Amino acid sequence: MSTPSTPAKPSTSAKPSTSAKPPKPSAPSSPTPSRSAAASAVRGGWVPVNQAAWKQALDVYHKVAPKKVPAGIVRVPEFHTDCSVSGRAADDPIVLPGLPGASHMHTFFGPKVNATTTPAKLLASSTTCNAPGDHSAYWVPQLLRDGKTVPMKNFRVYYGSRLKDPSKVVPFPPGLVMVYGDAKRQVATPKGASGQFWCAGSAEIGRSADGNWPVCAKGGNLIRQVTFEDCWDGKHIDSPDHKSHMGPATNGKCSGKYPVAVPNISLMVGYNSLGGNGLKLSSGMASSMHGDFMNAWKPEKLGALVKICINADAKCGITPGWNS
């Protein structure tokens, strides 16, 4: 893992940023994609997209009839899913597939996840996420205080677009996986630094003794946002660093190496904590925060949400309409 997330700091209402431009990801470790990798596998190296499955998903998406957006609807290209914890384990089926216990501890959301999890297995599993059709898995490093797990307060995933024209966005290809953030980044995060944990629902009233964590006033809680890239290379569902098949927009458009506009994902990770001393991620310092995503949406559900909410520049909830 290499480049840390640098989204703009949102307000304490925990609404994700729709304007920050993510940094360009590091170059892949292997310049020549492997064409022998199975399209449905999650493994090291370049994994080509299953073109037949991708075409089928696009056909489903293109058949969705757009809806007229009523007056008074907030014009933000967005929908979301809320998930609860599905498990915790020292597994990472994207970075360390097939190696149980080889990772630092992660907190998982959505279906149950282990080292052998694949998108196909997720689609056949139950999930803790409430958006119909979302069987995707999401995970972040475990947060600890003095060695004990800090409980979660909430976990919401916003799907949106930071592009100038959100009508260009299409659904993710089946089986796409990606990582954002850098578990190896161990640097100080004093007040004002990028990649901050912050206080939602109350003011920051101080910092931890090491300066890396905020102290929140009563009534609030510690929160962190992890924002993924907006653009896809159109060829691969995984890459050697699990990042290089994804990339940033250029001047508000997906072009060049990353020509395909896909939903922008923001993980909003809320904790039952006021911050302060004794905090540490299972991956290390606060700067090592990162997120993993394994796509397992049912194509007909994701296609409708993208067409009716994101493409129409309309704020939805968990369903493709304005009452959820």
Image (cartoon, rainbow, N blue to C red):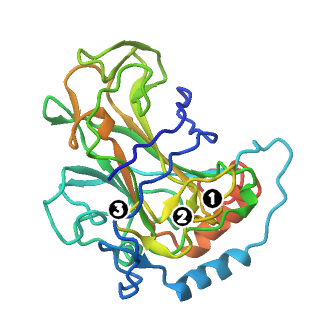
Residue beneath label 1, please? Answer: 319
* Residue underneath mark 3: 241
Question: Is label 2 in contact with label 1 (beta carbons under 8 Å)?
Answer: yes
Of 189 and 225, the residue lying toward us: 189
| Position of residue 193 measured from the top left corner of the image (x, y, whole percent) | 42, 25
Q: Nearer the viewer, residue 49 or 274?
A: 49
Compute the Cα span from label 3 to label 2.
30 Å
- Amino acid type at mark 3: Asp
Helix, strand or loop at label 1? It is loop
Q: Earlier in the sequence, mark 1 or mark 3?
A: 3
Q: Amino acid at mark 2?
A: Pro
Find residue 152 and report its image quarter.
top left
Q: Nearer the viewer, mark 3 or mark 2?
A: 3
Residue lying furthest front:
31
Real-space CA distance between mark 2 and mark 1, rounded to the nearest whole angstrom:
7 Å
Q: CA distance from mark 1 to mark 3?
A: 33 Å
x then y, percent, for residue 9: 52, 30
Q: Is residue 119 left or right of residue 72?
A: left
Please report the residue visible at 61 percent of the width from the left and 84 percent of the height from the top.
55
Image point (59%, 67%), residue name: 302
